[in-house]
Image: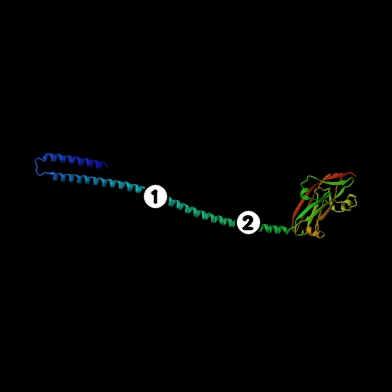
Amino acid sequence: MLWTIINVITLFVLAVFAYLLWRKTQNKVGSFGIGDLTNMATLVVAIFSLFVAVAAYQKSVEDNEEQQKSLDASREQLQAVVDAATKQQEILSRNLETSKAQQELLSKNLEISKSQLDLVKAQRKEEQERQARKPIAEINLQTTTGPKPLDDLEKLPEIDFPLEQGKRWGKVVFLVLNKGKVEIIRPVVKIFSSQDKVSVENDGVGLLRAQGRLRDPTIHNDIQFSGPDVNDIETAEVAGGGYRFTVDITLPDSINAFDLTFLIHGKNLSRKAYTLHFKVIKLSS
C-alpha cells in the first residue's frame, strides 16, 4: 500500500513537471501541439497504470504468501490432529488387545475354578460316601431320667452317684448306639478308674465284693469287653437300639468322689474316650 502511494506521488510530480515544461516551450517550438500533449498524458497514464499493476501484483504476491503461511499452519495443525488421532487409535488397539487377553485369561481361570469346584464336589461326595460306610458310635450313660450323651456329661464338673445308706456298691450302665451304616467290627470296650481303691468289675460282682463273698480279694479298677464273647455292634436300625455295657462300682467308705473312663474302638472305628467325674451321694434309708 505504501509503495502504491509513493508511485502515485511520483507520477503526479512528473505530470506537473511536464506541464510546466510545455508552458515554457510552447511559444518557442511551434510544432508542439495538442496531440503531443495528449500523447504525453497517455504515456503518463500508461506509466501510472504500470505502477498500479506492479503494486497490485506485489500485493497479490504478499497476500498469497500470507495465505500460504496460513495454509501451512493449518496443515501442520491438521497433521498434529491426525498424528494424535493415530496415536490414540494405536492406544485403543493395544487396549483392545490387552482386554481380549485379559478376557481369555479370565475365561481360563473360570474354567480352572469350575474344574477345581467339580473336583472338590467329587471329593466331598466320595468322603460322604466313605463316612456313610463307617460306623458312628454314640455313647450314653443310663441315668434315672434316661440316657445322657457322654459328650455332654464329660463337660460337667460332677455327676451324682447315689448310694443307699450302708451300701458300698452301685451299677453304671453305658449304652453304645451305632448310628452308622455298617456294624462296628471287633469292638473293644474298656472301663476303668484312675483310683486304685475303686473296684470296676462285671455286673453282679459288686454285691459279692461288698458282702465279702468274692474269693478274689484283689481290687480291679478296670475291665475290658473284647474277644469272641463280644459281638460286632450292629447298626441301630438292625439292632433296634443300643448295646449295654454294665459294670459294678464298689467303693470304700473313705471315697466320696471318683472318676470313670469309657474307651471304645474297633477294627473300623477310631478310638473314642470319655472321662466322667462322679460324686457319691448318700441316700437316706
- Which image quadrant: the C terminus? top right
Q: In front of the other: label 1 or label 2?
A: 1
Residue at 75% over, 54% down: 271
Q: Is residue 24 left or right of residue 161?
A: left
Q: Residues within 10 Å of mark 2 (few under 14, many from 20)?
A: few
Q: Which percent across, then down, holds residue 9?
A: 22, 40
**At 30% from the left edge and 46% from the top edge, which residue is drawn?**
63
Badge 1: residue crowd in 10 Å (few <14, some 14–19, many ≥20): few
Image location (x, y in percent) of residue 39: 16, 46
Q: Position of residue 172 (x, y in %)?
A: 83, 51
Name the residue located 15 percent from the left edge and 40 percent from the top edge. Answer: 19
Are the residues at dot 1 and dot 2 in contact (C-beta closer than 8 Å)? no
Please determine whether, in this image, residue 153 is positioned above or below residue 108.
above
Quadrant in which residue 233 is drawn? bottom right
- What is the x, y in percent for residue 142? 82, 51
Q: Secondary structure at mark 2?
A: helix
Q: Amino acid at mark 2?
A: Leu
The quarter of the picture where the N terminus appears is top left
Q: How many marks?
A: 2
User: Coloring scheme of the render?
Assistant: rainbow
Which amino acid type corresponds to the residue marked 1 in the rendered image? Leu
Q: SS of the residue at dot 1?
A: helix
Question: Foreground: 50 or 246?
Answer: 50
- Between the C-alphas of marks 1 and 2, the distance is 57 Å
- The residue that disc 1 covers is 78
Of the numbered discs 1 and 2, the one sitting upstream in the chain is 1
Of 147 and 232, which appears nearest the observer?
A: 147
Nearer to me, 219 or 227? 227
Using residue 225 as the reference point, say whether residue 133 is left or right of it: left
Q: Is residue 42 left or right of residue 198?
A: left
The residue pinned by badge 2 equals: 117
